[in-house]
Structures are given as C-alpha cells and as structure tokens.
Amino acid sequence: MLLIKWNLETDHFEMGQWFKVRIYEKRCDLSPDGDLLIYFAASQKKPFVSWTAVSRPPYLTALALWKKGDCWGGGGQFQTGAQIRLNHRENQMDLAPDFSVPKWLSVAQFGDHSGWGEDDPIWSNRLERDGWIRTGYPEREERDSGAKMWLKFDPPITWEKVHPLWPRKYTLRMSILGLHERNGPWDIIEHHLFGLDGRTEMIGRSDWADWSPNGDLLFAQSGCLYRLRHEKGKFGPVETSEEIADFSKLKFENRAPTEEAQHWLRKRRKARDK
C-alpha cells in the first residue's frame, strides 16, 4: 500500500510511504485538518500481529501505536483534532513500549462495544459523520464460495449523500452489491449521480466517490482518480470527467519518512477543535 496526500484545491499529489502489510482502510480516519492519520494494520507476524497507529500523512511511520493482536475492531476516529476514539477493548488500550502521545491529545474508547465487530461500527459511523445516509439494506444475502461473488446483497446496501452546495439538486448514491469477487475487489461497489430533473448518471463500478468542497464530483476507478467539474451548478455526462491522476502503474519503493513525519505537532491549534 502507498499513502498519498491529495490537495483538493490544486489536485497536487505528494507521494508518501509504502507499507507491505494489510491496512484496513474502512477503520482509518483523518483529523479535521488532515495532518494526522489513525489507521489499523495487520502483518499477522510478531511482535504486534495487528495494531492501530497514528502518523503524519503521507507517511505511515507510527508516532503512537497500540497493539491489537487480532482483527476484531481496531482503528479509530478523530472526534476533533485533539481527541481520538480508539476502537480497542479495555485491555488493549495501553500504548506499546517506546511510544507516547502529547498532552494535547486525549484518547478514549470508541464506545460500549469498542474493539469488536469488523469494519463496522467505525465505517458506518464515519460515513454518517461525513454526511452519508443509509437508504437501503438487503432483505437477504446469497453466499456461494464457488460463485464469482462470494456474498451477494439483495437488494444492495445503499448510502446517499446530497450535494454540499445544492442539496436539493443532486444526490450521490453508493450501492454495495456484495463482497469478495474472484480476481476482483473485496467490496463490489457502484456509484450513481441523481439530479432533481430525474436525470441519472451512472458512474458504474468504482472504488470510491464523494463531493469535492468546491462542488465537483470526485471518483476513483481502476487505480485512477477523476473529477467531473460543474459549470455554474450543472454537471455534464460522466464521460466528460477529467482524469486527474493515474496510480495504476506505481510499484513499491523504499521511501524513508521525513524528519517532520517522525515527530508530533508541537502544539494543538485551538481553532481546529471548535
């Protein structure tokens, strides 16, 4: 995995560190300013097997690390830039040796069922916090280890998010069709753009989509990032989207963290916590 820092205003990308372990992206979170990342990772090897860490993106070098030891729960969320809710059980809340957190950062458990479950409740909670509303849930699930899609949802799980500038005009829908496609992704997802005039733009199979703060539509497909720009509040066809980055051909590189990435921020900026 490679961590990349994305400036949404300029579409400038800063390449960070590669990591040869499994990172559970649905159990990760960025601080409100984007200057800290909390992530859950697993190597299935000693001494930690699995762990939650905080780093300074685009680097994954741990500033704080909590040993997990299994893949139930893990990860966490930022309540503010100075408050973390850690998705660990009570006996897994101690920092690993040689790690510490600054006085301005407080750490507490995620909730009553902290440290259990898998991607949920972290993922659903994060989606809801960021403006998504779950609008559909499957009535049944089809499981077939020999099929192309191991687990199929009928109907799909759907989440919707209205446009941040024109909430009555556009809605983005994420449909989770199932899990674990043979020779494909773990999450099988489609996205659609709905307009007030009844128009539907099908983005189709895609890894991620969301609204940009400036009102554009952003989405990821096959290792590439796209931006569908609006013109005075109107979107053209999805086919007119601009490819802003192609990461599909990147290969592993050993990349050391910068000096800054190996140290905590010196102090809390109070404005970020309001």
Image (cartoon, rainbow, N blue to C red):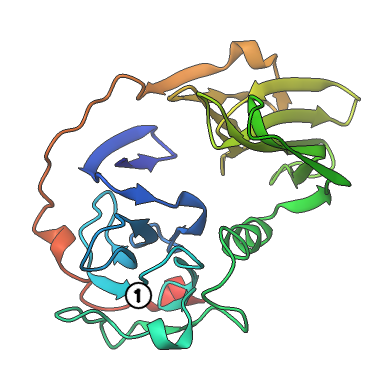
Foreground residue among 156 and 31: 156
Where is residue 251 shown, x and y percent of the image? Answer: 23, 26
> In the rendered image, which quarter is residue 102 located in?
bottom left
Q: Residue at x 41, y 67 (%)?
A: 70
Residue 128: which quarter of the image?
Answer: bottom right
Q: Residue furthest front?
A: 146
Q: How many marks?
A: 1
Q: Secondary structure at mark 1?
A: loop
Number of other residues with Cα within 10 Å of mark 1, as a class: few under 14, some 14 to 19, many 20 or more: few
Which residue is at the front of the view, 140 or 54?
140
Image location (x, y in percent) of residue 178:
69, 37
Query: In screen coordinates, is 24 left or right of 198?
Result: left
x then y, percent, for residue 20: 24, 44
Q: Residue at x 44, y 76 (%)?
A: 84
Residue at 45% x, 63% y is: 71
Front-lying residue, 257 or 235: 257
Q: Is residue 115 above or below residue 255?
A: below
Which quadrant: the N terminus?
Answer: top left
Which residue: 49% across, 73% down?
87
Q: Is residue 30 left or right of residue 200?
A: left
On the image, the x and y values in percent for residue 105 come to 35, 82
Vertical order, 259 against 269 (above or below):
above
Q: Residue furthest top?
A: 239
159 versus 198 height, above or below: below
The answer to whether 220 appears left or right of 45 in the picture is right
Residue type at mark 1: give it: Arg
Task: Tell me the residue that label 1 is attached to.
Answer: 269
